Amino acid sequence: MKKIFIRTLGCQMNIRDSEVICGLLKKAGYQICSSDGEADIVIFNTCSVRQHAEDRVWSLIGSYKGSKIIGLVGCMAQNYKERAFQREANISFVAGPQDIYKIPEILDKLAGGEFFERKIWEVDSSQRPEEIYHTGFFQDKSHAYVVISEGCSNFCSYCVVPYVRGSLRHRKSKNILMEIQGAISNGAARITLLGQNVNAYQDNHINFTKLLEQANALEGLAELNFFTSHPKDANAGFFQAIRDLDKLNKSLHLPLQSGSDRILKLMNRGYSVKEYLDLIDSYRRIVKGGLLTTDIIVGFPTETDEEFEETYDLVKKTRFNAAYIFKYSPRPNTKAAKIADLLSKEGKEKRHKKLLDLQRRISNSLRAGNKHAKV
Ligand code: 5AD
Ligand code: SF4
């Protein structure tokens, strides 16, 4: 029996995609290993959201010598396509996020001995077959990730996701509920619903709030979470559902990205600072004591010191429970990559550190139960 190890990098979507791949490969007779040492085949399920994530994968793959079959899958596979073989000669196959269902077939072909296709790349699909979500494979017996929508059509100007994961597609609610039911019967009491923008979910008359209600009603479920929300599609009705549905975690991750209106516009985020602040005001009024976390990018092209300070002041005022703060990284195909990125590496690092330090103080003070302490 051939042994496979999957190394997962990146977001929760990739964690779920790796489970999907494991489920398919187990069905095809492969054994899944917990480390690369014992494996014949090593698959890297990768992220392209920032250059740093890609650099790490190239160096990991570069360190493999010898006879293992190496596969590059996920966002980097879609980003590099067959160019990946030039970059690292020891890669045998490449499969983009929409093509992961072909991996068992690719491995069959590669095992075909003198078969002339020594290198295989599959990056042309735009849709995954629904069946791949129903192999019943979940890594964690008590918690399951469930994808509700794939891709993204928002085209935030810095983001590679629409180019590597394709345009937004919604899974059918009946299939999602069936998958959740299956995970519950498997022993999972906690579920996290996944999508790049869960609030945009729509399957005929079922919107995201309705889907949350239906999931919340499932017997055997103890806790429900979701990830990620987009401010332009969030509203009071959604916050009321967070308040009212008993199994739903009272917590919201609402990426801000910048505290400057000019930068938000350049980012194509679809909201102003005032709209964001009104929204979180409404969240905090409706979901009393609810946690609030965010994502922020510093050093977006042309961001001035003053615009960075606007973000800094907003973070200080808002007191997020946690903030994931990133240095801007130019990504291929994106609109922002065409704007000159003139801020030095040191300049970005300085802004990054200053905001991280502030957020650390805020998070610590909130954890210590001090809601209004000066930071
Ligand atoms: N550079 C830096 N951070 C980015 N993100 C997305 N694209 C980039 C980029 N090009 C961040 C955003 C997003 C999070 C998942 O990653 O903040 O919300
Ligand atoms: Fe990227 Fe924006 Fe889509 Fe999030 S909403 S995945 S940041 S394009």
Image: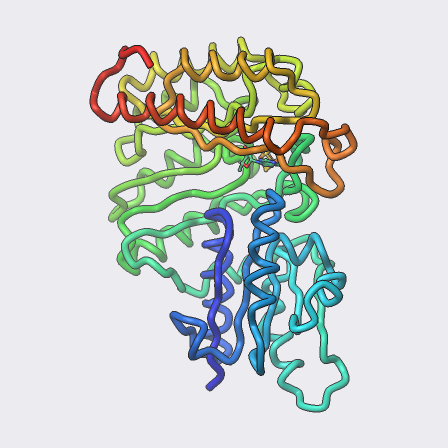
- Residue 58 drawn at (x, y percent): 61, 59
In the image, 237 versus 44, the foreground residue is 44
Residue lying furthest front = 346
Q: Residue at x 63, y 41 (%)?
A: 168
* Residue 228 left/right relative to 220: right
Comparing 93 with 203, the one in front is 93
How many labels sit on residues? 0
Dividing the picture into quadrants, the one containing residue 287 is top left
Which of 299/128 is in front? 299
Residue at the image position 36 percent from the left and 61 percent from the top: 139
Q: Residue at x 56, y 54 (%)?
A: 56
Choose between 144 and 317: the one closer to the eye.
317
Q: Which residue is located at x 51 percent, y 31 percent?
A: 199
Q: Position of residue 144 (x, y in %)?
A: 36, 52
Q: Position of residue 14 (x, y in %)?
A: 51, 53
Instruction: Please state the quadrant of the image where ligand 1 appears.
Output: top right
